[in-house]
Image: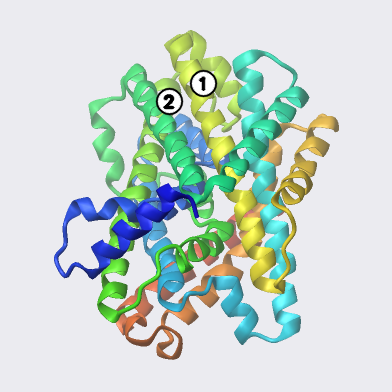
């Protein structure tokens, strides 16, 4: 542990021992939720938000708000599991499930990790291509080099990597503040928070937004980020740690939610009713922004996409480490995992496949992993034998069951629509 991290640990321990609550005590506890929040601003979100805003204006803002509230709920339960048990979700599954079931969870988890990295890495490579004009293949190489450098920050402890990812979140936020004001959204955007659907097509786009909301890999990861980060030695310290965790999750996921709202509103202001990009194609969105809003808006979009791709790809690699170590108690060097999970993206590029279509395919694969993460999480978080006094109450379990059922049902519906168009 570096001297700087040691200082943070001391400050954190002092904050937990203090029976009073002070906002300034929160600083040492910031980090895990910001790493998790990146999954809610990944290139897949860019595609769905752009498509939703371009096709239906501001009408789907309420969907993003609802999805973000669900994300806060689920990510807090994951973080809570790590704080209370000192174990992450894959480790608990390995302890309590049969060996064949655990290996099934591991295989699907690895597929999810690779699908996640495919989307994020392609997003970063595409952004570099749009910004610099270099071929997509060389954009992928450069994105790989940068991601290796980001992961190398772990050599100096967890704080530098958390700070770097948080900085990327800040860049995305600034870019979309610029984008939002350049798009000059209509004051009537507030009507978009009234729930409702105009047609079946709008429902499909809404399900796409909701379906991409809960990312299985980041549920696994969040429990790992909190399990040993700041030890709690007393029941009072654990309760205060959970309070700080809840505040951080609400704050970090709140920022992610605002960015997604701004993303859809900016797309509505730029494209809706103007014959612009309604497919979610990121290249078309960039090219269309130049004549509509000017080069600054297009550059802000590409920089935000680059920050999103690099940060979410790094988080995806960390998730892959947690999945392997938790399910099968095996660990490989992180540079090996980074290299392996980059491979599908290079295959897609070398084959000349459309990057946006590859993003869609990755979301289909991710849909398969939703039940594998959500159902055990809800089961463990509501079990007094595992969580003790911190087990979810009956009302929380009911809400969790309802949220889980809706998310799984919508993902299955989206999956059927993507694989069998016109089947429903």
At 16% from the left and 57% from the top, the residue drawn is: 22
At 24% from the left and 31% from the top, the residue drawn is: 188
124 shown above or below 216: above
Q: Mark 1 touching mark 2, by CB under 8 A?
A: yes
133 shown above or below 310: above
Q: What percent of the width, then of the height, locates residue 357?
A: 69, 38
Q: What percent of the width, then of the height, locates residue 214?
A: 50, 57
> Alpha-carbon distance for marks 1 and 2?
7 Å
At 42% from the left and 21% from the top, the residue drawn is: 270
Q: Using the rendered image of the protein, determine whether residue 356 is visible from the camera's viewpoint.
A: no
At mark 2, the secondary structure is loop
Which of the pair 394/326 is nearer the observer? 326
Q: What percent of the width, then of the height, locates residue 377?
A: 50, 74
Residue wearing tag 2: 272
98 shown above or below 251: below
Q: What percent of the width, then of the height, locates residue 299?
A: 50, 16
Which of the pair 311/61 is nearer the observer? 311
Residue wearing tag 1: 276
Q: Image check: 298 left or right of 393?
A: right
């Amino acid at each position: 542990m570096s001297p700087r991290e040691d200082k943070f640990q001391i400050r954190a321990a002092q904050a937990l021992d203090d029976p009073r609550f002070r906002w300034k005590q929160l600083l040492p506890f910031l980090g895990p939720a910001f790493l998790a929040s990146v999954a809610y601003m990944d290139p897949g979100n860019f595609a769905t938000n752009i498509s939703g805003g371009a096709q239906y204006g501001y009408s789907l803002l309420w969907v993003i708000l609802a999805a973000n509230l669900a994300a806060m709920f689920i990510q807090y339960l994951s973080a809570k599991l790590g704080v209370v048990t000192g174990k992450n979700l894959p480790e608990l599954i390995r302890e309590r499930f049969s060996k064949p079931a655990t290996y099934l969870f591991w295989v699907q988890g690895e597929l999810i990790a690779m699908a996640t990295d495919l989307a994020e890495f392609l997003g970063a490579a595409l952004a570099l291509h749009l910004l610099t004009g270099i071929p997509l293949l060389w954009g992928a190489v450069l994105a790989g080099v940068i991601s290796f450098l980001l992961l190398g920050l772990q050599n100096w402890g967890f704080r530098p990597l958390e700070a770097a990812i948080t900085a990327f979140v800040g860049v995305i936020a600034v870019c979309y503040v610029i984008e939002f004001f350049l798009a000059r959204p209509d004051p009537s955007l507030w009507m978009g928070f009234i729930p409702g659907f105009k047609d079946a097509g709008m429902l499909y786009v809404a399900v796409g937004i909701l379906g991409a909301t809960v990312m299985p890999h980041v549920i696994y990861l969040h429990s790992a980020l909190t399990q040993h980060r700041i030890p709690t030695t007393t029941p009072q310290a654990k309760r205060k740690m959970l309070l700080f965790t809840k505040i951080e999750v609400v704050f970090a996921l709140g920022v992610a939610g605002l960015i997604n709202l701004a993303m859809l509103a900016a797309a509505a202001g730029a494209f809706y009713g103007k014959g612009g990009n309604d497919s979610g194609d990121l290249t078309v969105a960039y090219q269309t922004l130049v004549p509509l809003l000017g080069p600054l808006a297009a550059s802000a979009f590409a920089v935000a996409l680059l920050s999103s791709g690099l940060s979410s790809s790094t988080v995806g690699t960390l998730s892959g480490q947690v999945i392997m170590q938790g399910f099968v108690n095996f660990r490989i060097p992180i540079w090996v995992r980074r290299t392996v999970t980059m491979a599908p993206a290079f295959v897609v590029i070398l084959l000349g496949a459309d990057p946006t279509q590859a993003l869609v395919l990755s979301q289909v694969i991710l849909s398969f992993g939703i039940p594998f993460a959500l159902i055990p999480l809800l089961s463990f978080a509501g079990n007094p034998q595992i969580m003790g006094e911190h087990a979810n109450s009956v009302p929380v379990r009911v809400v969790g069951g309802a949220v889980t059922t809706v998310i799984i049902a919508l993902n299955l519906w989206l999956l059927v629509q993507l694989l069998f168009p016109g089947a429903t």
